[in-house]
Image: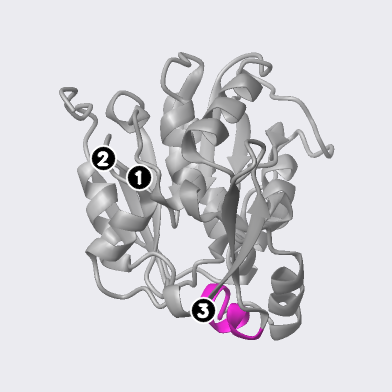
Amino acid sequence: MNASPASHPAHESTAAGSPDRAAALPLSAATETGAHPEGGRPTVVLVHGAFADSSSWNEVVSLLQRDGYRVIAPANPLRGLTSDARYLSSFLETVEGPIVLAGHSYGGAVISEAAAGHPNVTALVYIAAFTPEEGESALELSNRFPGSTLGPTLRPVTFPLADGGTGTDLYIDAGEFHQQFAADVPARVGDLMAATQRPVAAAALEEEATRAAWKTIPSWSLVTTQDLNIPVAAQRFMARRAQSHIREVDASHAVSVSQPGEVAGLIEQAARSTN
C-alpha cells in the first residue's frame, strides 16, 4: 500500500432528494433513447452490486439517456473480486472514448479494481458502495463499523465449483429483503427485487482488494444515511479517505431505485467535471 491518495479536493454536501426529482433534471438536445455521446460526453458504465442485477439501474439509465449520455450496464458475475474485476476490465476495453464508471454496493469494490490501468476512465462514482484500500475486503469494511443488519438476513446456498469443490452463495431472505435492502421503495417493487435478486458468492465479499483506482482517478460518492447493508459510518470513512466529492441522501441501500434522480445527478456532475 505504497501509493498515496490523489490530490483532488474533497467536497461534501447534503441532498434530501425524492423520487420525483427526476422531473426537475434539465432536458438536453439529445433525447433519443440510447443516443451516443455528443460534444465529447463520456460513456457511462454502471456496475450493480450483490443481491441485485442490472435492472436496478433502469430509471438511472433512462434519465442519463434522456440527457444525451450513452449508458451501458453490464452484468456483474458476483463470483469473486479478482475475477469480477477482470471481467469488467475486459469489457471496458471494448468501450471507445472516455468513461465514467459507477458502482453500487459491492460493485464499488469491483470498479476500484477494474479501473486501474484504464486511462480512458475519467471518473469513478460510488453509489452506496465499498471503496476499499488494497488489502481490505467488503466484509471487513462492513464489520468495522456498527449499523449493518445484513448478516442475520442472509441465507446460504451451496453450489458446485469447477474444480470439484463447493462454494457458498448468499441470498437475502425474501421475507426480509424489502426492509433490509429497499425500505424506501414500494413494497410491490421490493417484492419483485427480492424474487429476482442475484446471489453473491461469500468468497467475493471476503476477497481482499489488490488495487485502488480511486488513488489516481477523481471520485464522487453518494452516501445513503438510512442504509442497513453498508453502515453510513463506513461509507463516510471510505469516501473521505478517497477524497471523493461527497453527497449524502436520506435513502436506503437501494437508492438507484428509490431516488434515481439523485444518482443520475451525481453521475452527471462527475461527467461534467471531467469533460
State how far apart marks 2 and 3 are (Cα): 30 Å
Q: Secondary structure beneath disc 1?
A: loop
Closest to the camera, between mark 2 and mark 3, is: 3
- Residue shown at 71% from the left, 31% from the top: 70
Q: Which residue is situated farthest in the right direction here?
A: 32
Which residue in the protein does label 3 denote?
A: 153
Residue type pointed to by label 2: Ala
Residue type pointed to by label 1: Thr
**Magenta part of the protein: which range?**
175-183
Camera-side residue of 185 and 170: 170
Which residue in the protein does label 2 denote?
A: 242
Residue type pointed to by label 3: Thr
State how far apart marks 1 and 2 are (Cα): 8 Å
- Residue shown at 32% from the left, 67% from the top: 232
Q: Say which mark, if any, is on residue 71.
A: none
Instruction: Point out residue 35 in the picture as x, y percentages from the top left corner.
Output: 79, 31
Q: Secondary structure beneath disc 3?
A: helix
- In the rendered structure, are the residues bearing label 1 and label 2 in contact, judged by CB atoms less than 8 Å apart? yes
